[in-house]
Image (cartoon, rainbow, N blue to C red):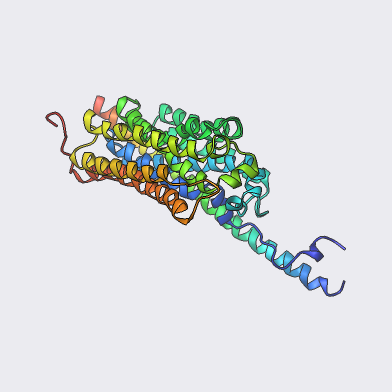
């Protein structure tokens, strides 16, 4: 039983490390999504302003 | 004593790569390539950033459908050797997380497509995800040996979606590109299933070699390959493809038929099959991948580099 304690700690450390890595990738993906939506919105706005001023 | 104290040292925790594998990156590559071809060949222009976002949406849509497929097929994936190391059967990713990933990324991809292009392209993308993730995976795959033929339409949508993203419409030309992938899918996939028919039989999936035998499958492979040849040359007649496309498509169509004839004459998929028979099926499978990249690549080169010279008409 005593021999199993370091094993449990090691498994928990590995689990946390894997979870942390996954969280970093998730954050990167979410950040990228936010940037993309912002960029697309800005381009759409610019196109609409251009079209409106062109029509006027 | 808790389970944690008994955790084996070789236990593998899920990495971001496992979630990426759920999205079938190899298929994503093919989908993106054909989607870009449709987008580039379509008349009109698109803001480059919007075009990149639209292509990303197509890639994510394909990935989402792949994740839904892996979620539903986890039981048969565990039975087949080729798929037993996938993230769900290997135990790296829980099934409900794959389902969540598939549904969330589906929504994100459709929204991104709508934002970057138009509602029609987004609706087509949503339909293609549902076609593969639900209609092929849940309805067709375990019910009919024609699963690959009918389900092949799912993989044929990307050039139509790419075209719709630019123009908001889908005239005949993108549907010809759709037809090329549609008729390409059966010989491509059945070549693989001739090699893995025992696995499919073990998993209870009614693939053509399992239900109708290897000889019938080899005939069907040749039938669809012969059908593919005129369809692949149609773009040269409608003006979509120029001389470069016509040359590449003609040579490769002849080569495709040659490989299919070699499979037809072999014993691939039979109990008595030898190494040369397996090789014929494998050669056809590998060539079919090259074929699709080359045919759509020729279109991309023509439109991307200004090499387009029409075969018929004044251009």
Q: Is residue B290 above or below residue B310?
A: below
Q: Position of residue B103 (x, y in %)?
A: 59, 38
Q: Is residue B21 visible?
A: yes
Quadrant placement of the C terminus of chain B: top left
Query: Observer-nearest residue: A45 or B194?
Result: B194
Q: Is residue B87 above or below residue B119?
A: below
What residue appears at the point 61 percent right and 34 percent down from the top-left corner? Answer: B142
Please identify the quarter of the rendering in which residue B314 is found.
top left
Q: Is residue B279 left or right of residue B21?
A: left
Please identify the quarter of the rendering in which residue B32 is found.
top left
What residue appears at the point 48 percent right and 42 percent down from the top-left corner? Answer: B60
Q: State the residue lying farthest toward the front.
A: B272
Q: How many marks?
A: 0
Q: Is residue A45 visible?
A: no
Query: Observer-nearest residue: B244 or B217?
Result: B217
Q: State the residue lying farthest toward the bottom.
A: A3
What residue appears at the point 48 percent right and 39 percent down from the top-left corner? Answer: B215
Q: Position of residue B56 (x, y in %)?
A: 43, 43
Q: Position of residue A25 (x, y in %)?
A: 55, 55
Query: Observer-nearest residue: B246 or B215?
Result: B215
Q: Position of residue B79 (x, y in %)?
A: 66, 48
Please identify the quarter of the rendering in which residue A15 is found.
bottom right
Quadrant placement of the N terminus of chain B: bottom right
Query: Observer-nearest residue: B314 or A55?
Result: B314
What residue appears at the point 54 percent right and 34 percent down from the top-left corner? Answer: B212
């Amino acid at each position: 039983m005593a021999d199993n304690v370091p094993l449990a700690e090691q498994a928990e450390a590995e689990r946390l490390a894997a979870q942390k890595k996954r969280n970093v990738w998730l954050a990167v993906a979410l950040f990228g999504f936010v940037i993309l939506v912002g960029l697309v919105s800005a381009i759409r706005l610019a196109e609409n302003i251009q079209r409106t001023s062109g029509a006027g | 004593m808790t389970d944690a104290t008994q955790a084996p040292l070789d236990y593998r925790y899920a990495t971001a790569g496992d979630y990426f594998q759920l999205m079938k990156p190899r298929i994503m590559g093919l989908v993106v390539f054909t989607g870009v071809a449709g987008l580039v060949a379509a008349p009109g222009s698109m803001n480059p950033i919007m075009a990149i976002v639209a292509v990303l949406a197509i890639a994510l849509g394909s990935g989402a459908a792949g994740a839904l497929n892996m979620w539903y097929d986890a039981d048969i994936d565990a039975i087949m050797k080729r798929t037993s190391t996938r993230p769900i059967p290997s135990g790296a990713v829980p099934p409900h997380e794959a389902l969540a990933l598939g549904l969330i990324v589906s929504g994100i991809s459709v929204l991104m497509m709508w934002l970057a292009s138009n509602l029609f392209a987004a609706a087509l993308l949503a339909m293609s995800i549902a076609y593969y993730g639900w209609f092929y995976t849940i309805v067709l795959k375990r019910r009919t040996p024609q699963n690959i033929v009918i389900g092949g339409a799912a993989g044929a949508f990307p050039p139509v979606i790419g075209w719709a993203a630019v123009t908001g419409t889908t005239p005949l030309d993108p549907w010809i590109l759709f037809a090329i992938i549609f008729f390409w899918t059966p010989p491509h996939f059945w070549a693989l299933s001739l090699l893995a028919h025992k696995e499919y039989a073990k998993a209870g999936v009614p693939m053509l070699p399992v239900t109708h035998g290897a000889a019938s499958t080899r005939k069907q492979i040749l039938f669809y390959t012969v059908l593919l040849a005129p369809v692949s040359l149609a773009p040269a007649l409608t003006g979509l493809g120029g001389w470069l496309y016509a040359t590449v498509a003609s040579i490769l169509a002849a080569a495709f038929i040659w490989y299919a004839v070699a499979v037809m004459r072999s014993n691939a998929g039979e109990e008595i099959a030898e190494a040369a028979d397996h090789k014929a099926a494998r050669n056809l499978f590998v060539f079919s991948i090259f074929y699709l990249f080359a045919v759509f690549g020729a279109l991309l080169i023509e439109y991307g580099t200004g090499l387009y010279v029409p075969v018929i008409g004044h251009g």
